[in-house]
Image (spheres, grey):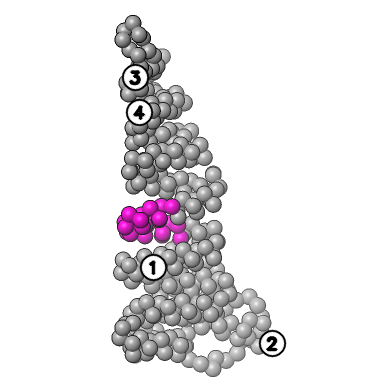
Amino acid sequence: MSEKLKEAEKHMKAGHKALKTNPLAFKFKPDHGGAAIEFTQAATAFQAAGNPDSCIEAWRLAAQMREHDSDFFLAGRALEAVGTLYEKEKRNPAAAIPEWRKASQFFRLCGKDDIAVKLWLKMAEHSASPAVSKPDDADALYSECIEVYETAEQFHYAAEVYRTYINFLAKQRRLEKLTKTIKEYMKLLKKLKQTNHLAKMTLSLVVLFLAQDNQVAADDALSDGIADDTHFLGTPEFEQGSLAVEAYKGGDDEALKKTVAAQTFAFLPVEIAKIARGLKIESADFPGRGPSGAKKERTTGGAASAPGRGGAGGLFDIPAEYRKKKEEKREDPAGA
């Protein structure tokens, strides 16, 4: 038996002894605090000795002692350590999640919401992984993290979680929930005045609506982007978004494919960029095509037929419906 293992066993015995009463020695109550210290030292020694099973047992006993004394912070730390052992040493993240869940409850009881949220994010990551495969649990955890951060008015942290959550929903192809989540995220971005991210999310909405064959909603997303910020008209996101919508309306699969290959789409969240690259027009009877499947000539101008932003005019041509929206904003100083 190694020295560390002997040390660990010694502390375990001392911990159990601390829980015993001895009226002859005037010890009428168990010493839960002393036992917790001994079990914690035993856990540390077991880990050093390379014995994860005994280490888990010792940490659990330490957590029970801390909970008995209402020391919820240290109880949470002990169960957090149990979860980490399951994750790292036992390679069993599914077993780690219940330990972290209880640890997070202890952290919330003692007002340490920030630590609890970090555990939720780890739980969500593992729940979404193939090893655990519980996407509904991950969904609920991400939502809870955002709610806690927004309630605490820690909006920048909430924005970070939103970005992870959006990629998760996109990877799951939960397009309806994803669309709703992006709109909620955009409200936060407006509050933070992060116009660059706002433009990317507007283009993301265009991609998602086209992926659902909803041209009207894609148009509306661009119009709403202008209404939220007139500077959106001069962004690559507006240019490429309007080109994609025009190509889709015209049933021009080649133009759509060329458009979504632009670097602007590569800057979107990873999973949404993949959805963009997968956009295509398959039906020969798609609106904008004749009975034989040949493309009809366009009767109106638009961004797809206009020069690029670096052309003679300095700005690509704006489709009529968006130009009208811009003029309305100019005439309404209160909305500008």
Q: Is residue 62 above or below residue 255?
A: above
Judging by the rendered image, the residue that carries numbered circle 4 is 69
Mark 3 and mark 2 lie on one chain; the one further toward the N terminus is 3
Q: Main secondary structure of the magenta part?
A: helix
Judging by the rendered image, the residue that carries numbered circle 3 is 31
Q: Position of residue 332 (x, y in %)?
A: 33, 87
Judging by the rendered image, the residue that carries numbered circle 2 is 291
Mark 3: which secondary structure? loop
Mark 2: which secondary structure? loop
Few, some or many residues within 10 Å of mark 3 (<14, 14–19, 20+):
some
Mark 3 and mark 1 lie on one chain; the one further toward the N terminus is 3
Give the amino acid type for the residue marked by disc 2 in the picture. Answer: Pro
Range drawn in magenta: 144-166
Mark in front: 4 vs 2: 4
Question: Which quadrant, please, contains the C terminus?
Answer: bottom left
**Which residue does the image show at 41% across and 64% down from the upper left?**
185
Q: CA distance from mark 4 to mark 2?
A: 79 Å
Q: Is residue 5 left or right of residue 174?
A: left
In reply to whether residue 57 is colored magenta, the answer given is no
Mark 1: which secondary structure? helix
Q: Tell me if label 1 and label 4 are in contact, CB under 8 Å.
A: no
Mark in front: 2 vs 1: 1
Q: Is residue 163 visible?
A: yes
Judging by the rendered image, the residue that carries numbered circle 1 is 187
